Amino acid sequence: MLRNPLYGPPSLAIAVVSPLKQSLVAIALISGVVNVLALTSPLFMLQVYDRVLSSGSVPTLVGLSVLAAGLYLFQAALDILRARVLLRIGEHFDNTLSGRVHDAVVRLPLLTRMPGDGLQPLRDLDSVRSFLSGAGPTAFFDLPWIPLYLGICFLFHLWIGVTALAGAVLLVLLTILANGLSQKWVSETIAQNMVRNALLEGSRRNAEVVAAMGFSGRMASRWRAANQAYLGANRKAGDVAGGLGGLSKAMRIMLQSGILAVGAWLVIEQKATGGVIIASSVMMGRALAPVDLAIANWKSFLMARQGWSRIRELLSKLPDRPRMMTLPAPQQELRVENLAILPPGARKPTVTQVGFTLQKGSALGVIGPSGSGKSTLSRVLVGAWSPASGKVRLDGASLDQWDREELGRHIGYLPQGVELFDGTIAENIARFEAGIDSEAVVAAAKAAGAHELILKFDNGYETRIGEGGLALSAGQRQRIGLARALFRDPFLVVLDEPNANLDAEGEVAVVQAIAGVRRRGGIAVVVTHRPSALGVVDQVLLMENGRQKAFGPRDEVFARVLQVQSTSALSSAKGFPATGHALKPLRVRATGCKPPEVAEAEREAEENDVCH
């Protein structure tokens, strides 16, 4: 069993930083040379004032100017090189973690309720990368060189050094104050932004409902209120950062003027030369520049630090999936062992005590009233959710013993709300495999009865369906989703309300698809309220209040249900409360009121069923 090195918070930092050691050392060396070269300006001014002006030597001035120009150009080249390296460090950080962050964003809704629109981890990754690629880290690499500049100020004169040291201490205190005052409002800004984005995404995804029922104005009011809260928090964070930044800038200018005044006083007292005045002012500015830059970038630094903290916490809760040993393709049975299911974010199980076994060539119809746990069960059967207790096994191996990519090849799933992805119909059916197998795609479409439907589109299988499949009707999405579930003949096919949006022709296709799964020795599980799909199943599971009420051969379960309903009706007539009201939809099967095409498909399926 192999594990990714990015497992848990401590090793996460090591995994990110370790490949960057050489780059970080290079940046530190470059920063050291840049800070040494920054002495060019004050030393040049010192020489000009103390040597050139006093001697009147033009050759000396020219020589000093050429030397200073060369050093300035070299410093500029190193600054450019440092910026380019920092940009690539940010890209490396993104490349190292983007895959795991994407995986976490996709997996998190299956484990817990996500705040906002669920994309905050991606924004956190962007904020960290942006900070690492910007000017912020430059300040931290320059901070260790402040003592060098302060030491040179002390070499000029004691009082010049004391003045510079006092200025540096004041700006450091401002930086600490900026951290204390900004942290709360930066966190609040991020939280309010998550709420705002969630409201906007909800309105966008449900635009038809909002427009049709005329509450777009109310949704807009909710979003404006959330936006105002976000802007308020952002304003306060900006006010703190901007206010302290402006104060630090003013203090820096004041300190430079103060050091000029101290230098002038020393010249008057004949304790320093005239060049010391200008050189010490420039030196003071260079000494305080990293602190000033750190304050200016403090808000982005806080956002990056908080983002990194959230990323570490998220990835510690969602460690990289271990690579599992390849198992043989399932061919015999599906076994469910005493399942208890706790939906993401719930505190108590909504489904308990469910257990059954299906052999190859079987089809199970899961019936029961709304809210009885049928869809919840289907999500656990395909491994989308993990059970709180119990196991789902394919040929004896529980689903958590499979590699997810390999398990997906053996499972077909049609959820109640069919979601397709932006791409062609062929890509969606093929589950976006690289190098689409045209024969397998067409075979899946034919098994779902969708081949003729797809050919009616102008571009056939190459038709782009748009985000979420919005270019298609609900019935068309369901038919294509069924073809995706049947792609490459998976052993287990789970269909949740597969005929909810279908016409008679579509229902026939569903019935024939279920029969086809059985004929080839697969297992089909069908969750349905409508009886048309039940004619082709051989097993029935009755759910009620999150519990398994009955399981067994179809006709036996139906007979028990009808007997319960008859008893309930008799009891109700005698003045006792009825108990079988939730099962009334099953009476439709007894009446024979179904489309003739569906009845014919059921008869054909039963005649051709190798299991009967």
Image (cartoon, helix red, strand yellow):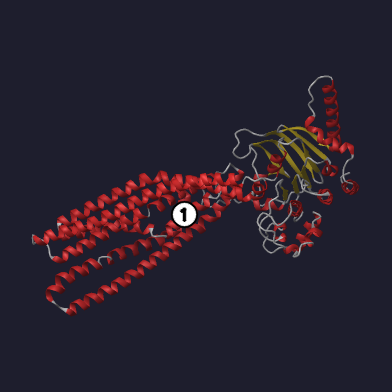
Q: Helix or strand or loop: what does disc 1 sit on?
A: helix
Position of residue 225 measured from the top left corner of the image (x, y, whole percent): 51, 44
Between 325 and 129, the one lying in front of the other is 129
Between 124 and 506, the one lying in front of the other is 506
Q: Quadrant of residue 392?
A: top right
Left or right of residue 454: residue 296: left
Going by the picture, which residue comes out furthest to the bottom?
A: 59
Position of residue 236 measured from the top left corner of the image (x, y, whole percent): 40, 46
Q: In which quarter of the image is the C terminus?
A: top right
Residue name at image x 16 percent, y 66 percent: 275
Position of residue 396 measured from the top left corner of the image (x, y, whole percent): 72, 43
**Can residue 403 be seen at all in this image of the molecule?**
no
Between 487 and 23, the one lying in front of the other is 487
Residue bearing mark 1: 127
Q: Quadrant of residue 566?
A: top right
Residue name at image x 72 percent, y 59 percent: 425
Residue name at image x 15 percent, y 60 percent: 263
Left or right of residue 382: residue 170: left
Position of residue 369 measured from the top left corner of the image (x, y, whole percent): 75, 35
Type of the residue with mark 1:
Ser
Going by the picture, which residue comes out furthest to the left?
A: 269
Compared with 62, 401 (above or below) is: above
